[in-house]
Image (tube, rainbow, N blue to C red):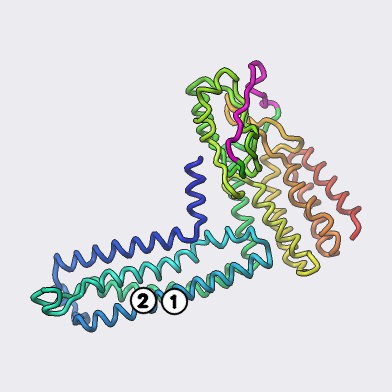
Amino acid sequence: MPGVAALARLRDKYWFLPALAALTGLLAGIALVAIDISVGDDWLGQFETLHGSRPEGARAMLSTIAGSTITVAGVVFSITLAAVTYASGQHGPRLLTNFARDRGNQLTLGVFIGTYVYCLIVLRTIRTAGEDGGASAFVPQFAVYGALGLALASIGVLIYFFHHVTDTIHINNVIARIARGLIAEIHRNEKDGLADTDAARLSDPLDDVAVATLAADRAGYVESIDHEALVALASKHDLKLCVQCRPGDFIRIGTPLLAIDAAQLPAHRDSLRDAFAIGDRRTDLQDLRFGFDELTEIAIRALSPGTNDPFTALACIDWLTAALSECERTVAPAAPTLGTVQSRVSAISLTFADFIAATFAKMRQHAATEVQVKSATLHALETLAAGAMHPANRVLLMEEHARLAATLA
């Protein structure tokens, strides 16, 4: 999972796709010029509508395309930066990650940068008769037409970008994207068996042995835990492990990461520590609380006196209700328990009470200030309670309903 976490961090970098596009443009320019050298320009005779370019004309066209694309790339970046500044200022700085890893923004910038690099590579290969010691002129016709195709594609991408950037900053779309990602992560955890907390099967595999803890060697947020690696290691070496932290937890140097038989810790210390990806900020890779916190933050900021946007808060409540409904089916209702990842590995599980505390409990005082928001929140809690599969979860929801109903603005 540290490798997966590293890939996720790379995905979050705004430069990654544009850098990949620049490399692609470089390689494409070299490849198409090589094809031109190999096949020549006799193929043009097969198409009546295509005509070969002279060196001066090809250079002028490539120079125009290169200059315009790099200029537009700067404009695209400026528009993206303005959109990010607006959205993060209005709805919270944690949205910066969502915009930075947005594939549409990265793709747009990448197409323009890739086209620019491609044109530079092809431009360098054009020569007139007698230039650079060459006996004859050379124009890579196939590569020049490739540049023309990229220029037309860039226009299409620019039109797409204008639509995409306005669509991206619409707050309802922002909320929906966060919520859908959260629901997908809930389903992924359920599929991986990480949310299974059947109390009848829970047991601590270290009950009968002397226990030692593996301590963190750096401070930061737990981005992900490679449960598969822990299970494989435990099975291979006959280990019993109990994970002591959860994705999203902040740990300091010396914080216990997991518990293990004291006699077996020294031999496997490094391998076990490698299963924990620790970074500078929380991510949504395994941390369900992160998505709930994002939606809750947007709702609370919308209800602040400086913003006073109850309709944004109502949208957050709708999507929080949808996510909590999915969550209710898969997590334990009460205090943290040991969820069995595999018979040799156990982990502290999140509970439905944790998610209630992270959402409606945090919003309670703010929701009480707006009549329509308070009414919508009460209705959401009633809806969740009516559809709850676990009686204990229904009790938690109705208790929160009672607390909100009793809260005065």
Q: Give 193 or 242, whichever is nearer the viewer.
A: 242
Q: Position of residue 68 (x, y in %)?
A: 39, 79
Q: Is residue 208 above or below residue 367?
A: above
Residue at horizontal 67 percent and vertical 34 percent from the top: 348
From the viewer's perspective, tell me whether residue 341 is left or right of residue 399.
left
The amino acid type, in three-letter code, at marker 1 is Val
In primary-sequence order, the first of circles 1 and 2 is 1
Residue 246 to residue 202: above or below? below
Say whether residue 82 is visible: yes
Label 2, secondary structure: give it: helix
Q: Toward the viewer: 398 or 207?
A: 207
Left or right: 319 in relation to 57: right
| Crowd tier of the residue under label 1, counting other residues whose Cα lies within 10 Å: few below 14, some 14–19, many 20 or above | some
Q: Name the image quarter holding residue 168.
A: bottom right
**Percent from the top left, x then y, of residue 48?**
18, 81
**Residue beneath the point at 77% across and 66% down:** 310
- Of circles 1 and 2, the one toward us is 1
What residue would you read off at disc 2? Answer: 152
Based on the picture, tell me whether residue 179 belongs to the magenta stretch.
Answer: no
Q: Quadrant of residue 176?
A: bottom right
